[in-house]
Image (spheres, coloured by chain):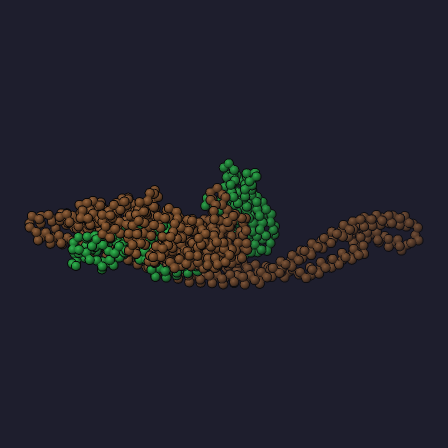
Chain colours: A brown, B green
Amino acid sequence: MRIPGVTHGPVQRAIHVLRPLLCGVLLLALPWAHASGKNVKPDPDGLPPQDVKDLHYGDVLFYFYQDDYFDSITRLLAAMELNRLPNTQGEAELLLGGLYLSLGEHVEAGRIFEKLLAGNASENVRNKAWFYLGKVWYQRGYLEESERALRQVSDKIQPRISAERYMLLAQLMLRQQRYDDAIAALSAWHGAPDWTAYAQFNLGVALVRTGRLPEAISHLDQVGRMETSSEELLALRDKANLALGFALLQAERAADARPILQRVRLDGPYSSKALLGVGWADSALGEFKRALVPWLALRKRNLLDSAVQESYLTVPYAYNQLGATGQAADFYNSAIESFDAEMKRIDGSIEQIRAGNLLDRLLNDDKKDTLTWYWQLKTLPDAPESRYLYQLLAGNEFQEGLKNYRELEFMSRNLDDWREDLSAFNDMLDTRQQAYNEELPKADAVMAATDLDALTQKRVDFESRINQIEKSNDFAALGTAEEQQNWARLKRIDEYLSLHPNDTELDEMRDRLRLLKGVMYWRLSQSFKARLWNERRTVKELEASLADTQTRTILVKQARQNMPNNTGAFAVQVGAVSARIEGLQQRLTALSERQNRFLQTLAIRELELQKQRIEVYQVQARYELAAIYDKASDKPATDKSKVRP
Amino acid sequence: MNLKSRLVSIVWRGGILGVAWAIGAGMPVLAANANANANAPAAAPARAPAAAVSTAAPTAVAPAVPAAAPDPAATVGAAAPGTPVSDAPPGDFKTLDQEVQGMKKDVIDLNKDLFVLQEELLFPANTQVAVYVSMDVGSFFALDSVTLKIDNKEVKNYLYTAREAEALLKGGVQEIYLGNLKVGKHELVAFFTGKGPMERDYKRGATVNFDKGVGAKYLELKITDRVSKHQPEFKIKDWE
């Protein structure tokens, strides 16, 4: 079952209009929101596109643009805490305010806006932020705050917003019964034709409220005659005609009231009341037969409608006036039966609501994964009590309360999810600790076997040796093993020959030795520089490796020391948030229960009021019926035959 | 005044007030509440008929309109969009509303703390690698999916919904991958598939070699329009 007033009526239209408007205030915070994509219309009031300044800000927007405001705000707050928005701090603050607003956190949003907007925000940004804040406060019934915010908006703003702002202020005054203020504000206002119609209507209403009907007539009549094809304005036109018609009836001008009431469309939302009014106008003019036409038509409609309920009494009243007492009695009897049945149904529904679960049933088909300020219940469960709740659910009070209840449920599920995650975190920390305990002996063994000081000393010795070789030009020292071996052999031969300097038989050997030494020396000296450079490079590599090893050793030592501390710190944090979750869950449960009771009370109050009204009507019907019988019993027998008790 | 006339008066006044309370003024946007009330006819008269009865002085039987008419101001005045009786949230509502607001703020703060804790626990900065996807303009490319390989190992294959693709077009940046890597050199390869110019199937790749240091590493996969060539362009930016 869909709620007519919500799904197709002005409420729904209002939501459709409000939603992009709300996004509008958020977009103020998005200077680089690209608008040139095929399907994306640029925001005329937005700032020019820019490059990505902070990845994490873009990440926040990714969720924001999908209307996932809860994830968006979580990521935004985390990014702010971790100082990840160095280039988008200003926009981030404004976006945060907008996100709070979109989540219905108007108090927090107001706090942020008030802080930000006192600063260097542009007039355009300031105006829009105050306007939307004022609008949300108005919706939530925070009228003083709303007026304060709306009065902060300057006149340098889009005509559409300016018109809406004036209208909101006027409505605020009407709600606060400040009729003279409202009249003054509305009389001075001029705007677009559609807004003018609303202004005229509200002005007419305010004038009637202050007893100035003659002045009100022209305003309401103007709205009641307007040419339009817009369903919304047609409804307003009906409303104006209805208001004016009944005001004229009050002023004892039934003849004037009738044509006004006849202007109301028969298929519109106000047709029942108009039919009732037309009947009363006819009746006031003494034309009871004529009055029966609208009243009988009305009587065929749904009994839940108060106008229809009244027609159950007005129809026999008219018959009675026409002298058709038998028909009057029949209709009174029928009314009594219908009222009786209706009251029993209401009693049954009250019992159902008292038994609990009303809200859970209402939210049963709701898509539960979003949290937005503009959420509204669109369908009613197929339950007996639903038929009585249309009125209640179309009202702000219940819808806002239901929204709060739904949000509490959302938060409860969110906390449950985190609770599971925290359990996994605890397992993970345990596993880490266990792995640490297992790996620790191995790590310690490796560390013990690694003498970094000795290795460092070896590198130092090696470098000294290289320096010595370079200094002494010890070419052979850098030769290959074979070269060094050959060089040693030549040296040994040289030593032998030195011991026998006068042995002529060794002269040939001496010559060969000289030749070989020369060749060998030339080879070694030729490659000495290259070999020395290689050795120096090796020393440097060794040095780097040693430094790396030292760093790793330090890291391992730190990790060895910190690991238990880190794990412990995380465990402490996990424990702390677990406790917070538990605390919040308890508060949530209690608050949900109170919210549930509050809404149940509203629902029951609504049903009891309906029942009381029907009871009054029933008493009236019984009384009139009794009067007819009394009258019949006082008359001659021929007349009595008209009455069928 | 006899009982009969009083009861007739009640009906009459109930009717008048019923209409009156149900009439909501308003405005195209914010008359939601009032308009909704107007659409729901049943409860309205029950809100205040009794108040009007006390001043009634009806004639005997006939609910004569002029005589029985209640105060006109009371009748039509209620047509204001937000009558105090019907619209203003009662004290209970405001108290509860403020408590729910406080509760929500606490839960949001907790979520933030848990988000930070989760990241520090699972993706510590010394090993953290995050890859992001951004789209600038997007006239020449409609994104369907992205596949990521790090060091030749597939770490992510992500299919985009229309809603996500639109969020990217509007300026959102998606954190497509968050993982851990050791300090050192690594290679990231990204494959983009979707519809290119002329609605043709389009697949392109981009590669980057990067050094993972001791701090967190952020890489951005940028999809941009190369207007001069009427082609999309795919780049990977290494955020230091």
Q: Residue at x 44, y 57 (%)?
A: A152
Residue A452 falls left or right of residue A414: right
Seen from the viewer's position, the closer of residues A205 and A31 is A205
Residue A326 placement (x, y as % from top left): 13, 48
Q: Residue at x 59, y 55 (%)?
A: B214
Quarter residue A544 falls in: bottom right
Q: Relative to residue A383, is residue B93 depicted above or below?
A: below
Residue A279 falls left or right of residue B112: left
Residue A318 can be seen in this image: yes
Q: Residue at x 17, y 50 (%)?
A: A317
Seen from the viewer's position, the closer of residues A12 and A63 is A12
Residue A39 placement (x, y as % from top left): 46, 42
The tally of labels here is: 0
Q: Residue at x 29, y 48 (%)?
A: A241
Residue A391 placement (x, y as % from top left): 30, 52
Residue A578 placement (x, y as % from top left): 45, 61
